[in-house]
Image (tube, rainbow, N blue to C red):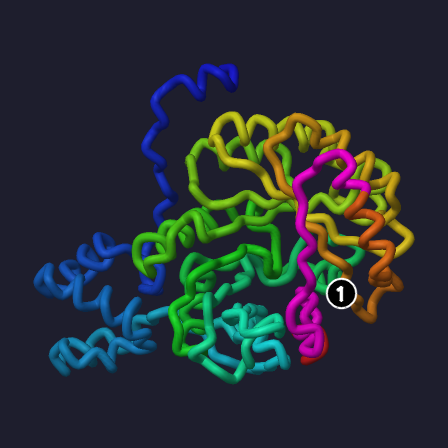
Amino acid sequence: MSVKSVVSSKPPTPQYPKISIPPLLGASLEELTAWVQEQGQPAYRGKQLHQWIYQRGVRSLTDITVFSKQWRESVAEVPIGRSTLQHRSTAPDGTVKYLLELADGEIIETVGMPTFKKWGKSRNRQADNPDGLERLTVCVSTQVGCPMACDFCATGKSGYKRNLTRSEIVDQVLTVQEDFGQRVSHIVFMGMGEPLLNVDNTLSSIQCLNKDVGIGQRNLTVSTVGIPGRIRNLAKYRLQATLAVSLHAPNQELREEIIPSARKYPIEELFAECRDYVEMTGRRVSFEYILLAGVNDLPEHAHQLSRQLRGFQSHVNLIPYNPIEEVDYKRPSYDRIQNFVQALEKHHTAHSVRYSRGLETDAACGQLRASKK
């Protein structure tokens, strides 16, 4: 079937993967209602359970006081699905990085990134002033470790253990929300792991975060290095979330040097899938481009990138590299960054420069986890 025929037809109702419960976190109101009825409780208890999990952040069924003590004791061993905070690190800009211990003892990272209202000439109001908080973004992980092994990434150096479950992904958002005492407004699936290698749990968590936690899909961003066929498949769900592709190079040869998995996915095919995604969804694709000094930050690289994106509904996020100890990559100087930006502007390529948050707290993905082993 051609892309045009898919566009012209009525979009199918997305069939999100269903995950049996428990753990209870991540389950919809309908699933929780069905579960409490299986336990011999009336249907209205499902709504109460839903409220206690998503609005009150309960961590144990024994703490839900609207239920009878006898019933609570009978289901005391049923897990809600909350993690344990192992470590918390705060940067001067207000960014907070968390190490969370899962039920099986594995450790993952998540990051809370507050944005403060502008105040005078300063970039942000003081990070210790909660009244100045404009929005709160959470960077969530989707896997324990990552199999993509990007050469510049701390997570890639630590190897891959397993996929995260729906509850483990949603828990990260609730953890940050509770810690800040503020509602989370935006979520980026840019933490540890490759979301499209854990697509069922990624989609289920998106559905939960949207319908149960109450975060609009347009405020969600799913990042991927690119897995053959997965971007077109994702387009079928007609998500309103933003797709961000971790590109980091304008040609196949250079991309293979810094992303070994790119050998299995020619850049021309990646761009073809992205173009199909735009046509099928009507939404632009963002391309993440980490600037590595002397590697991919020359004006000629910017010219190549602009040619690749010509006629493409896209946006380039330039990210000056956040150094890690495991490799010798360096952050480009300000002048080199500006030269790259000017080259993109010459070709009218939509772009922005995004500086890493929380540099004082081992902000690179996987960096804090590695330092605490």
- Quick check: is 291 in the magenta stretch? no
Position of residue 352 relative to residue 281, above or below, is below
Q: Name the secondary structure under disc 1.
A: loop
Q: Residue at x 34, y 22 (%)?
A: 10
Residue for point 62% across, 37% down: 314
> What percent of the width, then of the height, locates residue 282?
48, 31
Tell me the quarter of the image containing the C terminus: bottom right
Seen in the picture, residue 43 relative to 358 is either above or below; the reply is above
- The magenta region covers 343-368
**For the residue marked with disc 1, what is the amino acid?**
Asn
Q: Position of residue 188 (x, y in %)?
A: 53, 56
Farthest residue to the right: give it: 294
**Left or right of 98: which side holds 253?**
right
Left of 33 or right of it: where is 211? Answer: right
Asked whether the viewer can see residue 112, the reply is no
Residue closest to the eye, 216 or 84: 216
Asked if 197 appears above or below 180 in the picture, the reply is above
Give how far across and how far down residue 98 sits, in percent.
56, 75
Front-lying residue, 272 or 300: 300
Label 1: how many Cα within 10 Å (few below 14, some 14–19, many 20+): many
- Tell me which residue sits at (83%, 67%) in the image: 326
Q: Which residue, given by chain and number where applicable, does mark 1 sit on?
A: 322
